[in-house]
Image (spheres, helix red, strand yellow):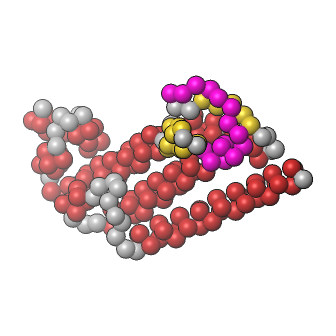
Amino acid sequence: MKEKLRNMYEESLIDTTALLNAVAKNWITIADVIEIVGEDNALSVVMSAKLSEISNACNAVIVNGVDIKFGEETVHFNLSIEDQSNINNLFRVVELGGTEFPYQADGGVCRIYTAAEISAIYIAAQTLITTQTTYHNELKQYVQTLTDVEEVSAVQYGMTLPEPYLTEMNEKLSVAQQQMQAIVGRMQQAAATNQA
């Protein structure tokens, strides 16, 4: 397969994107791609592949979703784009004064969730999304500073970020957490006012 792809690349029938797709399909390795495109082009090709890999990993973690414990029951919520939209709509119902609403968790049956449960679902979903996207963006910035193919190849989604990227991520996540706490506080005040 490598020789066939090499010939196609040399004849300009395919480009580096096609080679990277072949890596994703496990037809060839990154080392094969470097050999095909040459050392001079290796860094840009490997970096492109790595950025795509970490983006896909981030998305997979988000879509996998969150588990939330309600009493003794643990409920899983998928966070595909559609599910994120549904959870945002549920939360909007609570923001507008709703006290409960039906929803179906991932693989579960539709049941009625209270406003407090809907808020917990929303906060858990947004926390996961914000944490993962912030981490991804900082990791991406780090990768883009690397100038060695081996260093880029060694980067893995989930690794501890080096400085200053770790500090920057933690500062951003702190702001997000403060805002989530402020939202919860306002909602609790509104609920107390409505009960009085």
Residue 183, quarter of picture = bottom right
Residue 163, placed above or below residue 69? below
Residue 101: x and y in percent read 72, 34
Residue 151: x and y in percent read 22, 63
Q: Nearest the camera: 42 or 183?
A: 183
Residue 85, placed above or below residue 192? above
Residue 71 is left or right of residue 102, and the answer is left
Residue 80, placed above or below residue 172? above
**Furthest residue toward top:** 109
Would you say residue 89 is visible in this rendering?
no
Please tell me which residue is depicted at 57% across the width and 35% down the height of the picture: 83
**Does the segment drawn in magenta span residue 116?**
yes
The magenta-colored residue range is 107-121
Residue 5, placed above or below residue 130? above
**Furthest residue toward right:** 196
Residue 19 is left or right of residue 3, and the answer is right
Q: For the N terminus, which image quadrant?
A: top left
Would you say residue 111 is visible in this rendering?
yes
